[in-house]
Image (tube, grey):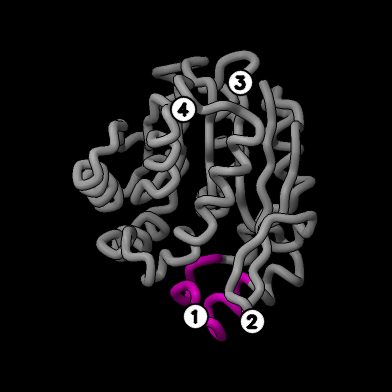
């Protein structure tokens, strides 16, 4: 299976803090509206069938569901999924969570989803290209897919690891491994080899002075791509 057990253990240990907006997951809460807005700029989620790959505690999946989509979130951290399910019950969100890999779900449900999202997950698996291929297989022809990850650049090492983990302490130390970061050219190549066409790219930046995240053209650190099948 395309999984790094140490990565699963890392996020499972923090699972109980997933929905605390002042916890280690504060950045995910802060960027979620930006991500959701960017996704909606490409596709109307109302009535669409969506799967969120590597959903964790369900921050993005839940907001997609609340935007009117028939939503499934998958992850291999049982603890994170339990937290996601509990929060959905608390707020009355209607969505499905499953403990299954992207590759296994793709074998089970090929071409069943209008939209596939995979955010901040590719840099945590041994073979990110395999996940991209599975996402492509899950998507219906004409559907849209969204990926986000971290660029492997000197700036991302400075900002995402030294800055975010050691200086600003926005994330726990060891959250990311620089060697697993993925250049945009590499991610686009994964997508094209999976039969997907580029539809857009957007950078995500953080201003430590104002403590505000914003979308823009700077893809040196965090970035998202939209592709179509």
User: Is residue 224 on the magenta stretch?
Assistant: no
Tag 1–tag 3 contact (CB < 8 Å) = no
Which is more toward the observer, 77 or 62?
A: 62
User: Is residue 162 on the magenta stretch?
Assistant: yes
Mark 1 — residue?
Answer: 169
Residue at screen point 39% across, 29% down: 71
How many labels sit on residues? Answer: 4
Q: Earlier in the sequence, mark 3 or mark 4?
A: 4
Mark 2 — residue?
Answer: 209
Q: In 3D space, how far apart are the residues under numbered discs 3 and 2 (Cα atoms)?
A: 39 Å
Mark 3 — residue?
Answer: 143
Tell me which segment is drawn in magenta: 160-176
Q: Position of residue 174 (x, y in %)?
A: 48, 72
Q: In 3D space, how far apart are the residues under numbered discs 3 and 4 (Cα atoms)?
A: 10 Å
- In terms of secondary structure, where does tag 3 sit? strand
Q: Which mark is residue 50?
A: 4
Q: Residues within 10 Å of mark 2 (few under 14, many from 20)?
A: few
């Amino acid at each position: 299976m395309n999984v790094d057990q140490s990565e699963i253990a890392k996020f499972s240990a923090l699972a109980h803090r997933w929905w605390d907006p002042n916890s280690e997951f504060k950045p995910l809460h802060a960027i979620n509206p930006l991500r959701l807005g960017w996704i909606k700029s490409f596709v109307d989620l109302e009535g669409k069938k969506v799967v969120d790959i590597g959903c964790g505690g369900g921050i993005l999946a839940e907001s997609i569901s609340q935007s009117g989509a028939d939503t499934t979130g998958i992850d291999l951290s049982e603890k994170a999924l339990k937290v996601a399910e509990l929060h959905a019950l608390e707020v009355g969100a209607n969505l499905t969570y499953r403990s299954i890999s992207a590759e296994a779900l793709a074998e089970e449900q090929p071409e069943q989803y209008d939209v596939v999202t995979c955010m901040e997950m590719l840099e945590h698996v041994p073979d990110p290209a395999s996940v991209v291929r599975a996402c492509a297989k899950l998507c219906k022809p004409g559907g849209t897919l969204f990926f986000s990850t971290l660029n492997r650049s000197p700036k991302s090492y400075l900002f995402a690891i030294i800055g975010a983990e050691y200086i600003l302490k926005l994330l726990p130390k060891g959250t990311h491994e620089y060697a697993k970061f993925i250049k945009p050219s590499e991610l686009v190549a994964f997508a094209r080899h999976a039969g997907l066409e580029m539809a857009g790219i957007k950078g995500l930046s953080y201003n430590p002075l104002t403590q505000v995240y914003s979308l823009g053209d700077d893809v040196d650190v965090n970035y998202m791509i939209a592709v179509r099948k």
